[in-house]
Amino acid sequence: METIIKIQNLQRTFEVGSEKVHALKGISFDVNKGEFVSIMGTSGSGKSTLLNILGCLDRPTQGEYLIDNVSVKERSEDELSTIRNRKIGFVFQNYSLLPRTSALEQVELPLLYNNTVSDKERHQRAEHALEQVGLKDRMKHTPNQMSGGQQQRVAIARALAGDPVMLLADEATGNLDTRTSYEIICLFQQLHSEGKSIVFVTHEPDIATFTERTILLSDGMIVKDVRVETQSARQMLESMTN
């Protein structure tokens, strides 16, 4: 299978005051094209550190990290920014939407930094992405005119519009009630069924069961990397209705 993420012997150390924190202690794993993987950490620091590395937000202290066969080693800040913009679609827990900006403009925004996309194509991509997440009739709405679930759908559309090789979701259901969480997971499962590669960072074991593989990080090391018996978020929604 084609490898989207390849991480080998990744190590990272932070200094907190006079203390050194070994956040990653030589972890190695791959994520293949089309996989839906959840990453769980037993501590907030371990989880967020792994998220930063997966997102190419910084360079590792030691080890190798490649996304779509592109290494992040010895890259300039501009090159890393381009990798983030074109290779990864980010979805955040707090949506990260501009308060007075329409859904369509929110989705177009990251494409403004891609000089290979024309104005017309940017607009078309944004419209298509919003249609994909079921917001065809909400394109002109601003965040204060939308529910939390709708705002998260805008964030997912924004991540999709750049046609990234991978969606990276950070606690994407963390601010939502149970029913809305299942609705958002339904959308992720649908995107996965269409061939999208998804890495979902979560601290909730029940959310991890909706993926197909779970990587558990503890004390800077991978302690478990297992296939999951995937649950259907659609069935969970239907059971709540019944």
Image: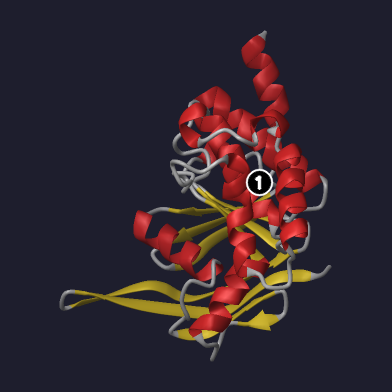
Say above or below: 39 vs 133.
below
Along the horizontal axis of the image, is 64 left or right of 49?
Answer: right
What residue type is disc 1 on?
A: Ala
- Residue at 67% x, 15% y is 239
Q: Secondary structure at mark 1?
A: helix
- Residue at 55% x, 67% y is 54
Give residue 193's quadrant in the image.
top right
List the residue tagged with mark 1.
Answer: 157
- Residue at 57% x, 45% y is 155
- Residue at 55% x, 88% y is 75
Q: Position of residue 119 (x, y in %)?
A: 72, 60
Category of crowding for the residue at label 1, using alpha-carbon neighbours closer than 10 angstroms: few (below 14), some (14–19), many (at least 20) = many
Q: Position of residue 127 (x, y in %)?
A: 73, 44
Residue 30 appears in the rendering: no
Q: Position of residue 82 (x, y in %)?
A: 60, 75
Q: Nearer the viewer, residue 100 or 63?
A: 100
* Quadrant of the drawing holding the N terminus: bottom right
Say above or below: 20 vs 106.
below
